[in-house]
Image (cartoon, rainbow, N blue to C red):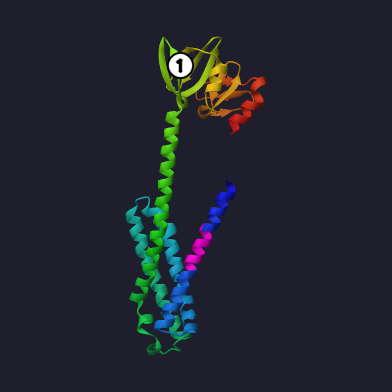
């Protein structure tokens, strides 16, 4: 499981690096064809690329998850506006550096496309929003899978039920609602989380074999649902309002099961 998670993270990182490498290459090609030669385009794209990368990463991995997805629209809009100002300011410095390093202080040597800050800002935020669409799509896919998993788990819990005869009636009991089972020789008391107690003629051993692995035998007279256990020691299992003893016979298996 851990290896699979690490592999998924590695693949995600590789895809992200390849995506941004492709963006850089496209920038170089764009400015090489329209304004500079390949060498000057590499210089210019190398200065512009960190602004695009930093803006996109901060927008999509900080502002979007921290504010937009949590529906804090006012703060999101405010910080997005601040980010717009900062990114345009940095783009202005890219143009200034281009004037110094590439155009040799001759502003007329710069292409209008390079000197146009508005056009450059539109290009930057087009890349930011395309990346943002990808991030949001991945988020919604992940959220959908999580919701589907929760629904599936809920259905599985609802399906985990058993039927006993109590007071000459067949009673259907959902496993998750059982806190613990208490043996009374040929009868058992099934203690539910709502405080209700159902008495049925059966043995605790037969119920143990019929119930899922969520139920742990701690005593010849007690079978507990580990999901209702709040804490335990080597001697006792604690619920919110009572404690049950763990006997020596079941200690090793009970402690191992409760720890899982």
Q: State the image quarter where residue 57 is shown.
A: bottom left
| Number of dots carrying numbers | 1
Q: Nearer the viewer, residue 237 or 141?
A: 141
Q: Nearer the viewer, residue 201 or 81?
A: 201
Residue 172 position in % (x across, y down):
42, 20
Q: Is residue 175 above or below residue 90?
A: above
Residue 176 position in % (x across, y down):
46, 27
Inspect the magenta stretch and tell me whether residue 158 lies in it: no
Q: Residue at 39%, 70% (x, y): give it.
A: 124
In the rendered view of the protein, which quadrant contains the N terminus?
Answer: top right
Range of magenta residues:
12-20
Q: Main secondary structure of the magenta part?
A: helix
In the rendered view of the protein, which quadrant contains the C terminus?
Answer: top right
Residue 137 visible, this angle: yes
Q: Residue at 39%, 60% (x, y): give it.
A: 132
Residue 241 visible, this angle: no
Disc 1 residue crowd, few under 14, some 14–19, many 20+, Cα 10 Å: some
Q: Which of 149 and 86 is in front in this view?
A: 149
Q: Which of 139 and 114 is in front in this view?
A: 139
Q: Is residue 244 above or below residue 138?
A: above
Residue 115 position in % (x across, y down):
37, 81
Q: Residue at 43%, 12% (x, y): give it.
A: 166
Q: Residue at 37%, 50% (x, y): give it.
A: 70
**Residue pointed to by mark 1:** 164
Q: State the image quarter where residue 130 is shown.
A: bottom left
SS class, disc 1: strand
Residue 48 position in % (x across, y down):
45, 74
């Amino acid at each position: 499981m851990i290896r699979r998670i690490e592999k998924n993270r590695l693949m995600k990182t590789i895809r992200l690096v390849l995506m941004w490498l492709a963006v850089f290459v496209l920038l170089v090609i764009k400015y090489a064809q329209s304004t500079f030669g390949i060498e000057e385009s590499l210089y210019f794209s190398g200065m512009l690329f960190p602004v695009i990368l930093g803006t996109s990463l901060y927008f999509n991995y900080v502002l979007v998850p921290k504010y937009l997805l949590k529906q804090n629209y006012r703060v999101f809009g405010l910080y997005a506006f601040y980010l717009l100002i900062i990114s345009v300011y940095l783009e202005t410095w890219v143009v200034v550096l281009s004037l110094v390093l590439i155009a040799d202080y001759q502003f007329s040597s710069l292409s209008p496309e390079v000197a146009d800050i508005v056009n450059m800002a539109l290009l930057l935020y087009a890349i930011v929003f395309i990346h943002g669409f990808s991030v949001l799509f991945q988020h919604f896919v992940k959220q959908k899978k999580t919701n589907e998993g929760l629904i599936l788990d809920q259905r599985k819990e609802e399906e985990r039920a058993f039927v006993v005869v109590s007071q000459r009636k067949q009673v259907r009991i959902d496993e998750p609602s059982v806190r613990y089972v208490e043996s009374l020789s040929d009868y058992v008391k099934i203690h539910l989380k709502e405080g209700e107690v159902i008495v049925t003629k059966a043995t605790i051993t037969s119920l143990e074999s019929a119930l899922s692995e969520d139920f742990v035998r701690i005593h010849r007279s007690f079978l507990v649902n580990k999901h209702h256990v709040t804490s335990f020691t080597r001697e006792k299992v604690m619920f919110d309002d009572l404690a049950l003893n763990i006997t020596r016979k079941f200690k090793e298996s009970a402690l191992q099961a409760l720890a899982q």
